[in-house]
Amino acid sequence: MATLYHAPHARSLRVLWTLEELGAKADVKTLPFPPREKQPDYLKVNPTGAIPAMVDGDRVMTESLAICEYLAAKHGSSLLVAPGEPERVPFLEWLWYGESTLMTPLSRLGRVASLPVKGEAIDVVLADARESLLVRLKSLEQRLEGRDFLVAGRLTLADVSVGYPLHLIAVFGIDMPLGTRTAAYRERLRTRPAFVRAAAIK
Ligand SMILES: N[C@@H](CCC(=O)N[C@@H](CS)C(=O)NCC(=O)O)C(=O)O
């Protein structure tokens, strides 16, 4: 059985959610966050200290979406939109939108706000990250017009990818107005039994 290194609210939640949607199991090791400081022996598994990591036999993977893709492919799951399916290209776009486009300003907001410094320069960086995230969420709101899921009319890893930053905004009570379609979409994702089970894993 694969081992998944997890920390509460970290991107390992995407992997746990995927596992639950697949009906698959992993041996979950929950680490104190950030493990780089609180559990340095984890650096032997992932030298960057970032969560998640998954060890499956002699494979070590440290990118949440790569792990999700690997697991979905292993189980022949419809969470993937395969090459040749009509919505393959928007699938790839939205799969990456969740990490590259939404998580970049959201991570900046979280990290900069947690620095032990204050001042005008910090406020400028925070305001810029917030503005960037707001603009990027508008594209999501447009995409959701007439759609329950981002692509292919079904839950895919694109939703797992994008659903994670939307979940973080809720969990950390980040003051970030969501459009009505985005708010309903987030609710739809977060009330899925598989998501609820995954989020309950501590
Ligand atoms: N692109 C990576 C990012 C991993 C990442 O940055 N994880 C965060 C938690 S969500 C982390 O561990 N940060 C603490 C650190 O880097 O020490 C992924 O999707 O897995």
Image (cartoon, rainbow, N blue to C red):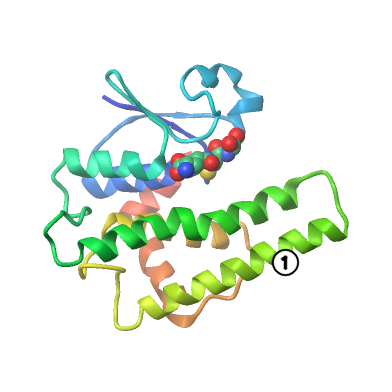
Residue name at image x 29 percent, y 18 percent = 58
Give residue 192's position: percent from left, percent from top: 33, 60
Where is residue 9 shown, x and y percent of the image?
A: 52, 46
Q: Is residue 102 left or right of residue 122?
A: left
Q: Residue at x 83, y 57 (%)?
A: 121
Residue 154 rendering spot, x and y as whole percentages: 22, 66
Question: Is the CB of mark 1 within 8 Å of ligand 1?
Answer: no
Q: Mark 1 is on which residue type?
A: Ala
Q: Secondary structure at mark 1?
A: helix
Answer above or below: position of 109 versus 28: below
Residue at x 55%, y 73% (from the top left corner): 135
Residue 200 rendering spot, x and y as whole percentages: 44, 46
Give the residue pinned by disc 1.
Answer: 127
Q: Is residue 43 left or right of residue 64?
A: right
Q: Residues within 10 Å of mark 1 (few under 14, many from 20)?
A: few
92 sits to left or right of 135: left
**Residue situated in front as seen by the camera: 94 or 12:** 94
Instruction: Name, please, the residue furthest toward the right.
Output: 119
Q: Is residue 150 left or right of residue 175?
A: left
Q: Quadrant of the N terminus?
A: top left
Q: Is residue 84 visible?
A: yes
Q: Residue at x 44, y 49 (%)?
A: 199
Answer above or below: position of 88 versus 177. above
Work out whether residue 16 can be spotted: no
| Res. 92 image quadrant | bottom left
- Picture mark count: 1
Q: Nearer the viewer, residue 93 or 78?
A: 93
